Image (cartoon, rainbow, N blue to C red):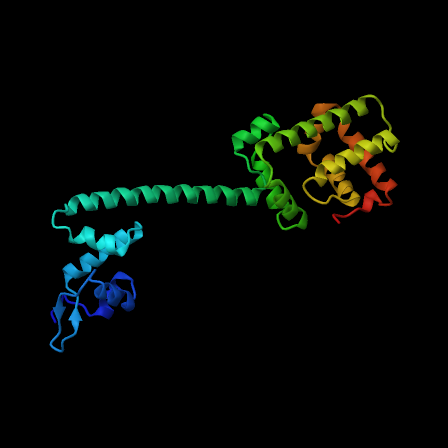
């Protein structure tokens, strides 16, 4: 046994297959060790190991063992041409697998963010005032809550057409709120309470929004400029009117809006 010859165990460890596999390939005549030790045990030469690597490549490409043997033992076969074909097929597989990886990454991102839309689609559907980073900001703020988990589960099933319908319904609701405020609808009236319920239910499509949670949202609308700026752009004074309307509706359902908590 010379320094470049390997026992079956050494060859198996080197190429990453089992000893049993090498024994099987020997039995079927696919790879027969070309050397022997003084004790009569077969050993693998460098050429034998190179043939094993060729078998592994063809096997990864899906060729049956019998077909691999015919390819390797064909005296008229051009070894370089076989290698070029192997490389082309491997490159194709790599491209296909990368496409699958990219698809999985998009699915993971969708499951994480809850919106299965590209930033461009988000702006197209929700308008030029929409900022795609709001989704990440919301996750940073509420990502560990039960409601965020519900939001991700429910919204991740929506298609772009579904989101367009959601955006249209939300826009219609906000226009109705602004019109009611300009018309002098009194918070606590039946008409105002009906609008408050529509507003609460617009959140309920994403998570179970209780009246207590709705009151918490109303407080956020008046305390955070991003929200108040948006409502004021629809109608001056709308922020305070919506806050008062939600509070009155919350109270009508037996919840103290001033002390309401996120429950």
Q: Position of residue 194 (x, y in %)?
A: 82, 32
Residue 237 seen by the camera: no
Q: How many marks?
A: 0
Q: Position of residue 114 (x, y in %)?
A: 59, 41
Q: Quarter of the image holding residue 237?
A: top right
Q: Classify 234 as above or below 148.
A: above
Q: Classify 219 as above or below 72.
A: above
Q: Position of residue 60 (x, y in %)?
A: 30, 52
Q: Quadrant of the N terminus?
A: bottom left
Q: Quarter of the image holding residue 163?
A: top right
- Seen at 18% across and 53% down, the residue is 72
Image-based side of 196 in relation to 85, left or right: right
- Seen at 59% across and 39% down, the residue is 135
Image-based side of 26 in relation to 158, left or right: left
Q: Quarter of the image holding residue 233?
A: top right
Image-based side of 5 in relation to 117, left or right: left
Residue 179 seen by the camera: yes
Q: Position of residue 148 (x, y in %)?
A: 64, 46
* Nearest the eye: 124 or 228: 124
- Seen at 63% across and 48% down, the residue is 149
* Nearest the eye: 108 or 71: 71
């Amino acid at each position: 046994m010379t320094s470049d010859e390997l026992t079956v165990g050494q060859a198996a460890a080197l190429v990453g297959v089992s000893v049993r596999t090498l024994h099987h390939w020997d039995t079927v005549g696919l790879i027969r060790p070309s050397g022997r030790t003084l004790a009569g045990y077969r050993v693998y030469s460098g050429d034998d190991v190179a043939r094993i690597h060729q078998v592994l490549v063809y096997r990864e490409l899906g060729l049956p063992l019998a077909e691999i043997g015919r390819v390797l033992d064909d005296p008229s076969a051009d070894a370089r041409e076989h290698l070029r074909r192997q490389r082309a097929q491997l490159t194709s597989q790599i491209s296909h697998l990368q496409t699958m990886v990219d698809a999985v990454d998009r699915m993971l991102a969708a499951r994480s963010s809850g919106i299965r839309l590209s930033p461009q689609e988000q702006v197209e559907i929700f308008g030029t005032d929409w900022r795609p980073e709001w989704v990440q900001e919301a996750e940073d703020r509420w990502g560990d809550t039960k409601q965020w988990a519900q939001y991700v589960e429910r919204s991740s099933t929506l298609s772009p057409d579904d989101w367009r319908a959601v955006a249209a319904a939300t826009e219609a609701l906000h226009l109705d709120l602004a019109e009611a405020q300009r018309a002098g609808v009194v918070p606590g009236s039946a008409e105002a309470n009906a609008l408050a319920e529509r507003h609460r239910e617009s959140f309920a499509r994403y998570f179970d929004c209780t009246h207590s949670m709705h009151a918490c949202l109303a407080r956020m609308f008046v305390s955070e400029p991003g929200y108040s700026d948006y409502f004021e752009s629809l109608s001056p004074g709308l922020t305070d009117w919506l806050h008062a309307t939600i509070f009155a509706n919350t109270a009508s359902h037996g919840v103290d809006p001033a002390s309401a908590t996120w429950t």
